[in-house]
Amino acid sequence: MRSWLRNSPQWSDFRAAGREGYGRALRRRRIQRLILKTPPIRTAVSGPVEVRALTWRKDWKNLLWSLKSFYHFAGVDLPLFIHDGGLAPGQAERLLEHFPTARLVTIEEADEKVTARLRNANAPRCAAWRARNPVTRKLFDFYAMSNADYVISIDSDIVFFRRPDLLLPGDDSPARNRYNKDNSYYYSAPLDALEAGCGVRPIPLINSGLSLIRPPTIDFPAIERWLENESLFADGWCFEQTLHALCSTKAGVELLPDTYLVGGGVGITPDRICTHYPGKFRHFLYEEGMRHLRDTGFLQALRDAGGVSRVR
């Protein structure tokens, strides 16, 4: 029985709800489900700028809020790639009901194509780290599988409130990668140690949850060299973000302004573009971010638009 319970997603969810608080979990589920009643959004199937997101069974509804708020306020139809990071049966189909022209990248497809790409790049350490840490699919898979000029990467715990102009390259396309500015230092080693071990001193406070990236700047051969020193990357939670910081500092990087906030619980100011609610801020995603969108007419605006992206 204990073995069965440990392997049961339902038991895992029940225990997680207990830690969250059953009342709070019930309110979360109620507001999460509201997005399921909105019409699908059709996106382009190809183009020079792509949107990519990684999600799994506990976050797929959050991703619908994230992506639908992005496309609604951005007013674009950029091609969308949703990477399976551990979805339960039927959830991929539900995601595609809401984004019928999106591309669902399965675990099997990504394993085959990215492993081959890393093998061709003579990067066995990259392949090994990717296999042991699912979050690194945001680092390796997004850029190994893209031929676009730019990739917009969006985490499931972000919602948008206004048009994110700095994420939308146009005639004045940025020469540097752009990232959210983190609310604290979250790299896998101190700056001095990273500089000594990798030859690059990354700028601090890069948060890889929201970014605009030129795919060739994610340098797999350089990552392979840096991974020789495993002690620098022992913190698996910050592993992917640290490598983003190293690659993009080397290639050219800038941080998004504070109107692209990482944090929560401070209310939504009129100039707020979006908020990323990671870690300890996650409950504000439901209690602040989604609630603000609901109360300001976002869900009704989606229904009025009927799933048509008003491209600007």
Image (spheres, helix red, strand yellow):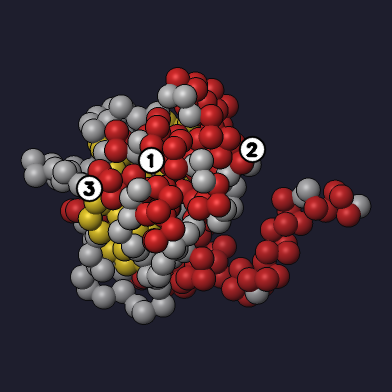
Please tell me whether mark 1 sits on a helix, a strand or a loop: strand
Residue 257 lies, with reference to residue 202, above or below; the image says below
Task: Identify residue for label 3.
Answer: 252
Residue type at tag 2: Pro
Task: Identify residue for label 2.
Answer: 89
Please tell me whether mark 2 sits on a helix, a strand or a loop: loop
> How dense is the environment of label 3, judged by Cα within 10 Å: few (below 14), some, or many (20 and up)?
few
Q: Are marks 1 and 2 in contact (CB under 8 Å)?
A: no
Which numbered disc, 1 or 2, marks the residue that appears first in the sequence?
A: 1
Please tell me whether mark 3 sits on a helix, a strand or a loop: loop
Q: Are marks 2 and 3 in contact (CB under 8 Å)?
A: no
Residue type at tag 3: Gly
Give the residue at the far right of this rendering: 1
**Alpha-carbon span between mark 3 and mark 1:** 21 Å
Can residue 80 be spotted in the picture?
no
- Horizontal side of 1 relative to 204 (left or right) equals right
Task: Identify residue for label 1.
Answer: 52
Give the residue at the far bottom of this rendering: 266
Which numbered disc, 2 or 3, marks the residue that appears first in the sequence?
A: 2
Can residue 21 be spotted in the picture?
yes
Q: In the rendering, at what x and y percent does residue 183 appear?
A: 38, 70
Q: In the rendering, at what x and y percent does residue 242 appear?
A: 42, 53
Q: Residue at x 46, y 48 (%)?
A: 240
